Image (tube, rainbow, N blue to C red):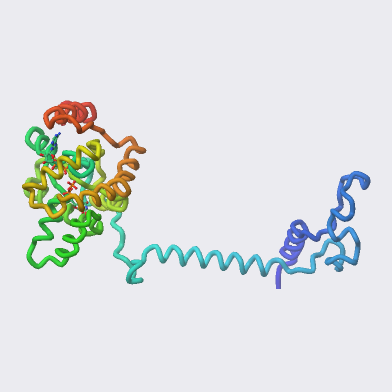
């Protein structure tokens, strides 16, 4: 049985918020709205509130209690499902709280730009002059594709030929392994990484920064499509790549525009993009690249 004070409080709250409450209005009778626009209770015992004045016939609290309990259960269910793998319905591995590499010990620059913009060419220059370690996501995927016994070989082959983005778990893991190997080789060196052609999709960007290492910024090579196409068709004459052909190039451009540009926009929104116009000769593009990096990182980067 409820405590008398509780009962009084309950009745007061019910009365206050009941739409059927009889008002004791401070407004003089002649200024009030006509009876037809006022509460039902104004017509005395005939409305839906035939009980004692001020007492609602509806028990509101059970409804409120049920609604609150239901909402609480729903929130708990949604939270628990966030930890589930949507494919298997199994509980996913616990999220890593901290990235594997600390950005105070390791420097990561993402290098982005359309296919054929000149990312690989400029990364080679930076490696030569500034001792970066160059990790090309595409090269790592092609190596994994060709590795004997790889369970992802066929999948990667198909994705690359169609210009699609390989599921992020594969690429992020390959990159993390390659970084770990490099850091282990030379623990004293301050690891400086150019991660080339990555992240090409938002999920990769978020996953990598959460679990592997936050990047300093994106070095973005901006080049129009016609120029990139010309370069790729030229490269295709000798590269032996399954995707340097007109049909795959078209698909890669589409993926770049629809999926990868939003990643650049995302980092741009955070002030984390260093943009270089990539249409001039390789040397000219490199000069601009160095200038921009010095501006951002200081002369001794
Ligand atoms: N600034 C440039 N002008 C003309 N050709 C270039 C330039 N930069 C790179 N290339 C050539 O274009 C092709 C694509 O360059 P690459 O660095 O492999 O691009 P990405 O890594 O962005 O796909 C290569 O054959 C390369 O030699
Ligand atoms: O994070 C990545 C990077 C590359 N790729 C695949 O690898 C291909 C080639 O990428 P790469 O960077 O080697 O070449 P680019 O297109 O920049 O010339 C892409 O089209 C994608 O199919 C991918 O799936 N995920």
Q: Is residue 144 left or right of residue 252?
A: left
Residue at x-position 32% and y-position 48%:
258
Q: Where in the image, quadrant-wise, is ligand 1 located?
A: top left
Measured as percent of width and height from the top left, residue 296 is found at 24, 29
In the rendered image, the quadrant that contains the N terminus is: bottom right
Residue 98 in sight from this viewpoint:
no
Q: Is residue 129 left or right of residue 99?
A: left
Q: Quadrant of residue 216?
A: top left
Measured as percent of width and height from the top left, residue 250 is found at 24, 49
Residue 116 in sight from this viewpoint:
yes
Count of labels in the image? 0
Q: Residue furthest front?
A: 246
The residue lying toward the viewer, choosing from 247 and 183, is 247
In the displayed structure, would residue 159 be above or below residue 112? below
In the displayed structure, would residue 142 be above or below residue 84? above
Q: Residue furthest right?
A: 30
In the rendered image, the quadrant that contains the C terminus is: top left
The residue lying toward the viewer, choosing from 157 and 145, is 157
Q: Residue furthest bottom?
A: 1
Measured as percent of width and height from the top left, residue 209 is found at 27, 48
Q: Is residue 295 left or right of residue 58?
A: left
Residue at x-position 21% and y-position 59%:
159
Measured as percent of width and height from the top left, residue 263 is found at 31, 45
Residue at x-position 73% and y-position 59%:
13
């Amino acid at each position: 049985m409820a405590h008398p004070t509780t009962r009084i409080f309950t009745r007061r709250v019910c009365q206050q918020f009941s739409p059927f409450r009889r008002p004791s209005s401070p407004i003089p009778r002649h200024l009030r709205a006509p009876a037809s626009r006022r509460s039902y209770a104004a017509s005395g015992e005939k409305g839906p509130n035939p009980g004692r004045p001020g007492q609602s016939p509806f028990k509101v609290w059970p409804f409120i209690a049920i609604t609150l309990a239901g909402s609480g259960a729903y929130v708990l269910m949604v939270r628990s499902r966030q930890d589930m793998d949507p494919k298997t319905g199994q509980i996913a591995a616990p999220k890593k709280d901290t990235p594997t590499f600390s950005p105070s010990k390791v420097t990561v620059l993402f290098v982005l730009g359309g296919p054929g913009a000149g990312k690989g060419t400029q990364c080679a220059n930076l490696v030569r002059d500034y001792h970066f370690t160059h990790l090309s996501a595409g090269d790592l995927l092609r190596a994994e594709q060709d590795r004997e016994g790889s369970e992802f070989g066929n999948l990667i082959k198909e994705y690359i030929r169609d210009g699609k983005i390989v599921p992020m778990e594969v690429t992020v893991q390959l990159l993390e392994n390659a970084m770990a190997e490099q850091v282990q080789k030379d623990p004293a060196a301050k690891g400086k990484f150019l991660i080339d052609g990555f992240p090409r999709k938002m999920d990769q960007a978020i996953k990598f920064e959460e679990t592997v290492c936050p990047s300093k910024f994106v070095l973005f090579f901006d080049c129009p499509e016609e120029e990139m196409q010309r370069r790729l068709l030229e490269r295709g004459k000798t590269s032996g790549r399954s995707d340097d052909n007109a049909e795959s190039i078209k698909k890669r451009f589409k993926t770049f525009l629809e999926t990868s540009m939003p990643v650049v926009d995302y980092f741009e929104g955070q002030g984390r993009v260093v943009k270089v116009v990539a249409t001039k000769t390789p040397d000219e593009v490199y000069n601009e690249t160095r200038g921009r990096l010095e501006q951002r990182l200081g002369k001794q980067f």
